[in-house]
Amino acid sequence: MTGDTGDAPGRAGGGARTPPAEPDHQVLTSLLGAWALSACSAEETAAVEAHLTVCPRCDREARRLRDAVGLLHTDGSLDLDPMLRSRVLEGCLGRRPARIPVPLWASPYDAETARLDALLRDFGDAEWHAPLRLKWFDGERQTDRRTTVAGVIAHLLAVDGLVSAALGLDDPLGGDGGALSPAERTETYWAATGRPVTRAVREPWREQSHTLVRTVSFAGRGVGELSVAYGDFALPLQDALLERAFECWVHGGDVAAAVDYPYGTPAAPHLHRMIDLAARLLPATLAGRRRSGLAAPARGLVTAGSPGRSLHLEIEGKGGGDWYIALDSPAAVGSADHTVAQVALDGTEFCRLVAGHVPPVEAAAGQEGDREAISDVLFAAASLSRL
């Protein structure tokens, strides 16, 4: 470099220099392999990464190449620092803010699918075929279904397909998903394999989860309110992805237990959002149980939006907080001034109850006040679970 800013010899005029043209698609595609190996120059890296934000096809190929590079490091271990991912993300975002950030409401799903995928990465055939039982509460009693680790991932793939279908993406059940419930979708997918599910299910599951996160990130405002049908009820997309994050965490724990491996809880903000979703669903679930004769009759109906008889749900520990559950009508507003009972539970214990892993009568809860209201709410919490 000479520092000379004058006109180049032989150049007429002396006008501003023309900036170099951006590489075309074919050139950038040819750089993906080098980019995956971190062998590009700084300029090439910037050009490739800018291209990936606008070209889904190259983005998918780049992800596959990066995954392939990861397979070259066979001496890796699952025993990673649990804060490593957050530190890496923090460092990356500090250097270059994400052009298309993941919506806050999709972050728990993004994090939990990544955690489960990290657990699955080093599994051999023995781990994929390890037996386990999926547990849930069917409304009156705890039940279970025998499957394998691969069967659990197939279950997640099939039910996540509800969100894919709502977004107009490919449904793993094809045109047969229709209005099937999550349990029906799972049984249909299992039956369609015609044999025990194998480790091959990991790739379509992880590709589907990546596609969902990428799609909602690019969709912009308003997509979070899109309705996702679950058969006999529906949830807004932002709640549906939160529910799927909860299922992914719960079943990640099931998988880890089947292979005798530790598995932690979600980040506190994510756990709080999962608990909040369950608390918001309780009044409608309680009303449904009442219509089926499984809960005590309402004692004091009020007009929609008015405060009514409530239970104070106090969640302690990580992700905790206070919620007031309307007891007599899903349209009522929970109120501290109208509290007739209180239940105190650890956050993880409450989530195990909601997942159907703990029978309501065995939930380790601090209880005070109306015993009937307490029982109804605990049973309603367990009834949120399903296959």
Image (cartoon, grey):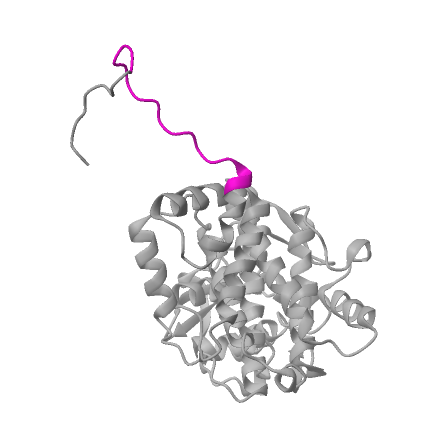
Q: Judge by depth and name the residue closer to the eye, 46 or 275.
A: 46
Residue 209 position within the rendered picture, expressed as x and y whole percent measured from the top left: 58, 59
Figure quadrant of the N terminus = top left
Q: Judge by depth and name the residue closer to the eye, 16 or 98.
A: 16
- Taking the image as shown, residue 323 lies to the left or right of residue 184, namely left
Q: Is residue 263 visible?
A: yes
Residue lying farthest to the front in this orientation: 10
Q: Is residue 285 above or below residue 348?
A: above
Residue 145 position within the rendered picture, expressed as x and y whole percent measured from the top left: 72, 82
The residue shown at (62%, 67%) is 286
Q: Is residue 75 magenta?
A: no
The residue shown at (54%, 49%) is 59
Q: Is residue 17 magenta?
A: yes
The residue shown at (40%, 45%) is 44
Q: Which residues are magenta?
A: 11-27
Figure quadrant of the C terminus = bottom right
- Taking the image as shown, residue 22 lies to the left or right of residue 172, namely left
Residue 331 position within the rendered picture, expressed as x and y whole percent measured from the top left: 57, 53
Residue lying farthest to the left in this orientation: 3
Q: Is residue 310 visible?
A: no
The image quarter in which residue 315 lies: bottom left
Residue 89 position within the rendered picture, expressed as x and y whole percent measured from the top left: 36, 59
- Taking the image as shown, residue 49 lies to the left or right of residue 179, namely left
- Taking the image as shown, residue 344 lies to the left or right of residue 183, namely left
- By secondary structure, the bulk of the magenta-drawn segment is best described as loop
The residue shown at (43%, 65%) is 272
